[in-house]
Amino acid sequence: MSELRQRPTAARSEKTEIPQRRRSSDNDGDHGISLLDMIRVIVTLIVASCGLSYYMTSTESMLWGYRPWFTRWPVVKQWVNGPVNLTPAQLSLYNGTDTTLPLYLAVNGTIYDVSENRMIYGPGGSYNFFAGRDATRAFVTGCFKDDLTADIRGVETMFVPVEDVVDEALTSAQKKIRRERELRAAKAKVEATVKKWQGFFANHKKYFEVGRVVDGVADGKEWPLCESAEKQRPKRSAMKEKS
Ligand code: HEM
């Protein structure tokens, strides 16, 4: 009888074994990688990468050159305040002489903040003449003295050939058609050049768009083509030689 009471049944032995197994697996867990450990490793790697990037990019970026717009304080401020509309006279105040104001320039009526490059656009900078104004014409012609204006009327002439061949075997109607075709191509070139510069400022990692120039529509007499643009015009004779 007493022997029977003391003999462990299969059920009893299972009950006693299971907690033992559990205990041993708990001990195994102490030596594994916990979630906290993984978070620690990831955070350490991120901090190390940011530090290394900051060092390698000469304190420019903690993300290896990647600077999303929301990490740039002036861009965030601009986004919160909304776009600015400035007349040419108001825009002229943003040419770098007043250091409390940002540096702005405009291309084709769109204003860009170029404050991060005072070396180039600030007073004494090599391209300071672009600051505080819309000088789209100069962006096309490269005439940095004569063409500091937004007026691009007639600027396509710089891409239209100079007619220096006298006795061409073409009727005046054929010449007119050719002229119109060349004028269309020249206008497309101007448009592409302006777009290229707008893209340059819009996509530049240091600059950003801030708004529009208002009341800056060109009127009156058409701006003459500057001397160096006139000199660079293609010549019909040279074109004939090539073809
Ligand atoms: C249509 C003609 C041209 C236009 C519209 C133009 C425009 C510009 C602009 C807007 C910048 C500043 C870029 C920035 O914000 O980083 C720049 C920089 C520069 N450009 Fe021009 N450019 C022209 C022609 C030239 C020519 C012919 C030369 C060389 C003889 C030249 C040499 C330079 C140099 C060296 C820089 C760097 C300036 C610096 O770091 O101070 N550019 N150009």
Image (cartoon, rainbow, N blue to C red):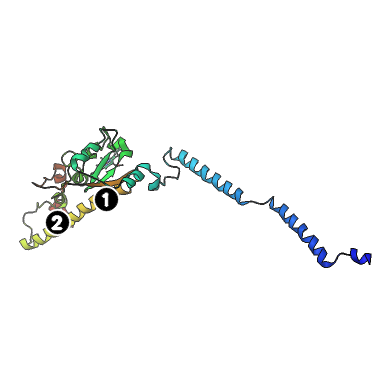
* Residue type (three-letter) at the residue carrying disc 1: Lys
* Placement of the C terminus among the 4 image quadrants: bottom left
* Residue type (three-letter) at the residue carrying disc 2: Leu
Q: How many marks?
A: 2
Left or right of residue 45, residue 108 in this image: left
Q: Is mark 2 within 8 Å of ligand 1?
A: no
| Crowd tier of the residue under label 2, counting other residues whose Cα lies within 10 Å: few below 14, some 14–19, many 20 or above | some
State the residue in front, 190 or 50. Answer: 50
The label number, if any, that marks residue 183 in the structure image: 2
Q: Is residue 86 visible?
A: yes
Percent across and percent down for residue 96 are 26, 35
| Crowd tier of the residue under label 1, counting other residues whose Cα lies within 10 Å: few below 14, some 14–19, many 20 or above | few
Mark 2, secondary structure of its residue: helix
CB atoms of marks 2 and 1 within 8 Å? no
Of the numbered discs 2 and 1, the one sitting upstream in the chain is 2
State the residue in front, 178 or 26. Answer: 26
In the picture of the structure, the residue carrying the numbered disc 1 is 196
* Placement of the N terminus among the 4 image quadrants: bottom right
Percent across and percent down for residue 192 are 23, 53
Residue 104, picture quadrant:
top left
- Residue at point 19% right, 42% down? 88
Left or right of residue 125, residue 52 in this image: right
| Gap in angstroms between the C-alphas marked 2 and 1 | 20 Å
- Residue at point 5% right, 61% down? 172
Looking at the rendered image, the disc whose residue lies closer to the viewer, 2 or 1, is 1
- Residue at point 30% right, 41% down? 114
Left or right of residue 121, residue 58 in this image: right
The label number, if any, that marks residue 137 in the structure image: none
Left or right of residue 209, residue 4 in this image: right
Q: Is residue 171 visible?
A: no
- Quarter of the picture for ligand 1? top left
- Residue at point 43% right, 38% down? 59
